[in-house]
Image (cartoon, rainbow, N blue to C red):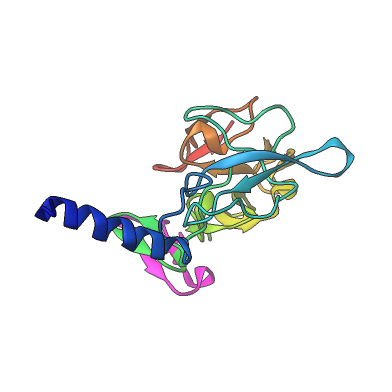
Amino acid sequence: MNTPLASRLLALGALCAWALTAGACRSKECVPGQQVACACAAGAQGTQVCDDEGARYLPCVCGAPAAATPGARAGVGEPPRPRPVLAKKQIRCGTNVCETACCATYEPPTCTQDGRSCPRTASGEGVIFECDGPEDCGAEACCLIPGDRTIAAVCAPRGECRGTFTHPRLGTTVAPRVVCHANQDCALSEICSPAGAVAGILVCK
């Protein structure tokens, strides 16, 4: 007996058989966005990501940090897990969000197109943010640098945002610090904590 239900099942089976030639009924090879480890040269480990359709894993990317479970920390000597890079900077500036720089010398902070134009105190001191986290700097680090008369957060190579030096005016030992939002932005030996002299900014210590 040709019931309506049987007719619908036959039609669905025919549709799927036709779609198999286009891959529409094919089972997914992997979960879209899933990351797995892969082998690189000299015994190194890289990462492969499943494509958006779940059809295959993309080529192995060597030199990138492996995926970590939530709350995991980078190992000793390993770079922090990168955050997605923003198309435009989004620098928190009081109640505003800036795309270029934030002048924070006085309250309330204000946005500016050029950090060099930020107002200074009578003695020439100023606080300037050209980033406020790793997502603003891509492969580089957002580095909080205590300068002669200016405290500035700028994008800089991660290798340059370390060590200590004698402050040219104060004569004390100071250190540039990587700006962070959470522990995952820091190396294993560091934690993300308040910068101290700069309100609202967290740094790796």
Q: Quadrant of residue 46?
A: top right
Range covered by the magenta-colored residues: 102-122
Where residue 114 appears, as percent x and y from the top left, is 50, 73
115, 130: nearer the viewer? 130
177, 10: nearer the viewer? 10
Q: Quadrant of the C terminus?
A: top right
Q: Farthest top residue?
A: 189
Where residue 124 appears, as percent x and y from the top left, is 53, 61
129, 133: nearer the viewer? 133
Q: Is any atom of residue 127 visible in this view?
A: no
Where residue 82 appears, as percent x and y from the top left, is 58, 46
10 w.r.t. 81: above or below: below
Q: Residue at x 63, y 31 (%)?
A: 74
78 w.r.t. 85: above or below: above
Residue 103 lies within the magenta run: yes
Q: Farthest right residue?
A: 42
Residue 64 lies within the magenta run: no
Q: Farthest left residue?
A: 4
Q: Quadrant of residue 108?
A: bottom left
Relative to 26, 187 lies left or right: right
Where residue 19 appears, as percent x and y from the top left, is 40, 64
